[in-house]
Image: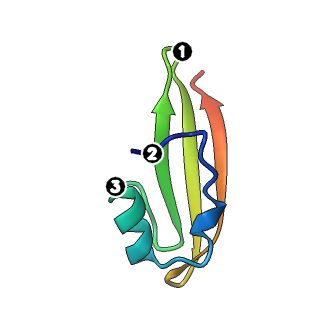
Amino acid sequence: MITMEKSYEYLSGKTKVQVVDELGRKSEFSSSVWVYVLKIDIFNKKTILYIYFDGEVVTHTKLIKVSEI
């Protein structure tokens, strides 16, 4: 299970196959950026994890919170 309290920087240097093994498959991805919606609260605020790749390897991650307007 994915939790938002977790730091995702440990994914840096891992391959796409390793990320899928760790977090599961997602439908929202391109070849260089994968998006995981980690949480949607009762106010429709989303916690989203962006994973950036250079080829097959994770370069960095970004965790953000967004609100629907």
Q: Please rate how many residues cluster around mark 2, counting C-alpha atoms within 10 Å: few if below 14, some from 14 to 19, many from 20.
A: few
Is 32 left, or right, of 25 in this rendering?
right
* Separation of residues labelled 2 and 3 (CA atoms): 16 Å
Of the numbered discs 1 and 2, the one sitting upstream in the chain is 2
Q: Are marks 2 and 3 in contact (CB under 8 Å)?
A: no
Residue 10: x %, y % from top left: 61, 65
Q: Secondary structure at mark 1?
A: loop
Q: Amino acid at mark 3?
A: Ser
- Is label 1 or label 2 in front? 2
- Is label 2 or label 3 in front? 2
User: What residue is pinned by disc 2?
Assistant: 2
Q: Residue at x 46, y 67 (%)?
A: 30
Residue 26, above or below 18: above
* Separation of residues labelled 3 and 1 (CA atoms): 24 Å
Q: Amino acid at mark 1?
A: Phe
Of the numbered discs 2 and 3, the one sitting upstream in the chain is 2
Q: Secondary structure at mark 3?
A: loop
Of the numbered discs 3 and 1, the one sitting upstream in the chain is 3
User: What residue is pinned by disc 3?
Assistant: 27
